[in-house]
Image: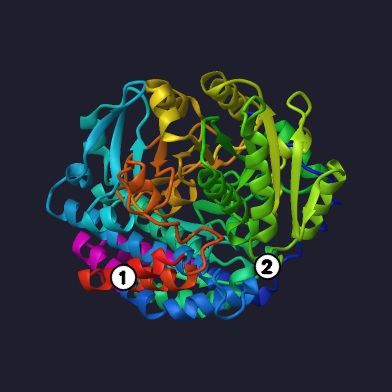
Amino acid sequence: MTTPAQPPAPTPAPTPAPTAEAKERIDRIVDELVHGEAAWAACSLAERRTLLERVHAATAARAEAWVRAAAAYKKLPDQDALLGEEWTSGPYPVLIGTSALAQTVRALEEGRSPVDDFTLGQAPGGRVAVRVLPHDTYDRLLLSGFSAEVWMPSGVSADTVRDGAGLGLRRPEETGGVGVVLGAGNITSIPVLDVLYELYAHNRVVVLKLNPLTDSLYDVFSEVLAPLIERGVVRIVTGGADIGTYLVHHPRIRHVHMTGSALTHDAIVYGTGADGAARKEAGTPLLEKDITSELGGVSPTIVVPGTWSEADLRFQAEHVATQRLHNGGYNCVASQVVVISSDWPQKDRFLEQLRAVLAEAPQRAAYYPGSDERVGQALTAYPDAARLGERLLVEGLDPQRPGPALTTEYFAPVLGVLELPGGAREFLDTAVRTANEKFTGTLGANVIAHPRTIAELGPDLDLAIAELRYGTVALNAWTGLGYLTARASWGAFPGHTVDDVQSGIGVVHNAVLLDSPERTVVRGPFRPAPRSVLHGELSMSPKPPWFVTNRTGATTGRLLVDFAARPRWSALPKIFASALRG
């Protein structure tokens, strides 16, 4: 994997020191958590499960306020269909995450392994595959045709998987000190889920430092996490870089977890400017504490050539556009480069459909700081790129000299197209090798292939998935579904270090608490219902609610949150009716 190349940036100003009053406040909070660590060590598994159930109930009660606060800073108007993104990436993952984690705690309470309720299969390379989706009948109905497995590293036995599941909850009295979570500013469920993972996977009490973008969610998060705050094991603070810097270097903080970019990671670990670069070169970090991270990168979408119908071309163009434009393009796992075969007879028609969807998809405000500048940097590097509203489509990337599109995470609505030669098998091999060797980051990779092509490739397709060195690989689905799958692991491919962090170190979510998972593999239907049924696919799922072209995304998202808050059969007809209108 290549070292990230970044556009030139001005030398940052030194981070100002926090005021004496702010230092005193942080010191007091850390002291409270030091005492809270003892309370957490004494907290039984049954009590910890009850706390999760209370967080779940608080999330349900504050879901509407949560979405309103997120929509306000993201500048989404009332009644906008894109509000569905805020329902399904805000309260929804927390609701399903707390439920799944509570089931894991209950299994440990009863003396069972958390994986006893899951099917363990085999994946290429002697890997154990834990089937985490679908997990129950509701999953089979609401996500018909979708599945997810967590693949463990080669050589790890099924018995080892069973014995290791549960992580820190197997020894709840052995706590991990006080940690800092530096919250994300883009997807609003991330800060809460990261706090829960620190507490339950690592027995670590937490101070959550909000990204300034999400300060408007302080009250909501305080109420959602109130059961844990009252227990003395969580605190939430706001502020700028001065507060974050003081926290991570605080002598009583033992661990740091962050979400963001590799640039931000290196600024925390080594410092900024020429001095920071020199420290990194010398291997002398400013921050010598243990740090875990979920960072971005350049995610590929590999489109395997086949014979597609006109409806297939349009649907998959919407699929690819969603992978880039969801949340305005401000996702760590947003697809940045579409890899297609230059020999595919339908290449031009697919690109025509992709241009149309990118132009027609709802326009939205560029709410994330620096977005316009990053689009401008891409336009400077690729002056012939097509402007589609605030979006940029860079076609014709040279495979020999593709430029920064493969090595710079733009974190903006910029999408590139890279053409490689070959039919399905040859192209797939070349695309996998290119993604592994030329693309920066290892968070997620998408593969799209017609069912007939999948059948023709046979076992070679799973071998190709195994070869992709990414933390989540999605076949005919978006890797974002891996994020939404509570029991799946989420994070970079394992093996990165602080001096070459790529897409991060460690995993989160992982509600089964599997020990050291390698990756998540997500699969979905090639077509939406009813076309899927007409073509023999075992899927009843219509256009997914996370598609940016879904007209009823907001209604479906709200209904899904209501269902996750209180699962019941009577809620399903309204969900299905709304989804089918999308």
390 or 540: nearer the eye?
540
The reply to whether dot 1 and dot 2 touch (C-beta < 8 Å) is: no
* Residue 139 on image: x %, y %: 28, 55
Prevailing secondary structure class for the magenta stretch in the rendered image: helix
Circle nearer the N terminus (1, 2): 2
Is 494 on the left or on the right of 317, as rendered? Answer: left
Query: Residue 134 lies in magenta, yes or no?
Result: no
Based on the displayed image, in which of its 4 quarters is residue 244 positioned? bottom right
The 10 Å Cα crowd at callout 2, few under 14, some 14 to 19, many 20 or more, is some
Is residue 215 depicted above or below 164 in this figure? below
Q: Residue at x 50, y 80 (%)?
A: 219
Is residue 459 depicted above or below 357 in this figure? above
Q: Specify the segment rendered in magenta.
A: 30-54
* Residue 502 on image: x %, y %: 61, 38
Q: Which residue lies under the disc numbered 2?
A: 364
- Mark 2 residue type: Arg
- Mark 1 residue type: Phe
SS state under label 1: helix
Q: Residue at x 60, y 72 (%)?
A: 238
* Residue 342 on image: x %, y %: 67, 27
The 10 Å Cα crowd at callout 1, few under 14, some 14 to 19, many 20 or more, is many
Q: Which residue lies under the disc numbered 1?
A: 563
